[in-house]
Image: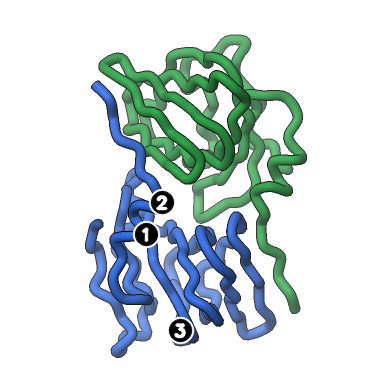
Chain colours: A blue, B green
Amino acid sequence: MAYQALNFTEKLSLLGEQWSPRVIAEMNDYQFKVVKIKGDFIWHDHEDTDETFIVLEGNVRIDFRDGHVDLRQGEMFVVPKGIEHKPFAEDEAKLLLIEPRGVLNTGHEGGERTATNDVWI
Amino acid sequence: MAYQALNFTEKLSLLGEQWSPRVIAEMNDYQFKVVKIKGDFIWHDHEDTDETFIVLEGNVRIDFRDGHVDLRQGEMFVVPKGIEHKPFAEDEAKLLLIEPRGVLNTGHEGGERTATNDVWI
């Protein structure tokens, strides 16, 4: 039997609106999500977990209260739990996020930028 | 303060021998490891955890007792816990592995192919 690989380009092509992460795989109780982003997000943190950003296409900046990190395609960064951060992309960028199942994109901030969680593509 | 992204190409350039995963980052109690592989590995499984393979360069085949999956650059696969598998690469390939801290490359099989664990680059 031939099992099926997950292809990032193919999964990214299925994405709809920006800032709406979609689940593509699970590893134990963690989820892999793809997302398109452009512009500014809101300040938030995840008080119970680290969060991994891997850039699949484009350029991303993550602002912290005391600095920032610039990420290009083929780069990753693990945002430590409890650290406030605000992702930003001048032009549309595409990311792979890795975090435990159940983590909301806005942490505990809520509000209109909160995406529906646990939607698979 | 400018935080530093992790660049896969840069980390891959620091790798020495094949089949020796090196840790580049941690997310909670999980580790991200880069590894170069060529040829056949041994059959093994990880009885307590899933294991994620992301292909950074080249082509990889993972054999299972009942089939296989072919992976190219930009593709991933999550090997379920307890499932015997055997990675293979005809030409040298470069991978990102994600799994809990403490997982050995040979599972519980042991033997000469077991790499020293938890070495960072």
Type of residue at label 3?
Phe
Instruction: Answer with mark 2 or mark 3, whichever residue precedes in sequence.
Output: 2
Identify whether B49 is placed above or below A49: above
Q: Residue at x 54, y 26 (%)?
A: B105
Quarter-wise, where is residue B58 in the image? Answer: top right
Residue A8's disc is: 2
Q: Position of residue B62 (x, y in %)?
A: 41, 24
Instruction: Answer with mark 3 or mark 1, whichever residue precedes in sequence.
Output: 1
Disc 3 and disc 1 in contact, CB within 8 angstroms:
no
Whether marks 2 and 1 lie on the same chain: yes
Secondary structure at numbered mark 2: helix
Residue bearing mark 3: A41
Mark 1: few/some/many CA within 10 Å (<14, 14-19, 20+): many
Residue bearing mark 1: A12
Type of residue at label 2?
Phe
Q: Residue at x 71, y 45 (%)?
A: B11
Quarter-wise, where is residue B13 in the image? Answer: top right
Locate the C terminus of chain A by quadrant.
bottom left
Type of residue at label 1?
Leu
Disc 2 and disc 1 in contact, CB within 8 angstroms:
yes
Residue B44's disc is: none
Secondary structure at numbered mark 3: loop
Locate the N terminus of chain A by quadrant.
top left
In three-dimensional space, the C-alpha distance between marks 3 and 1, rounded to whole angstroms, equals: 19 Å
Side of A40 where A63 appears, left or right = right
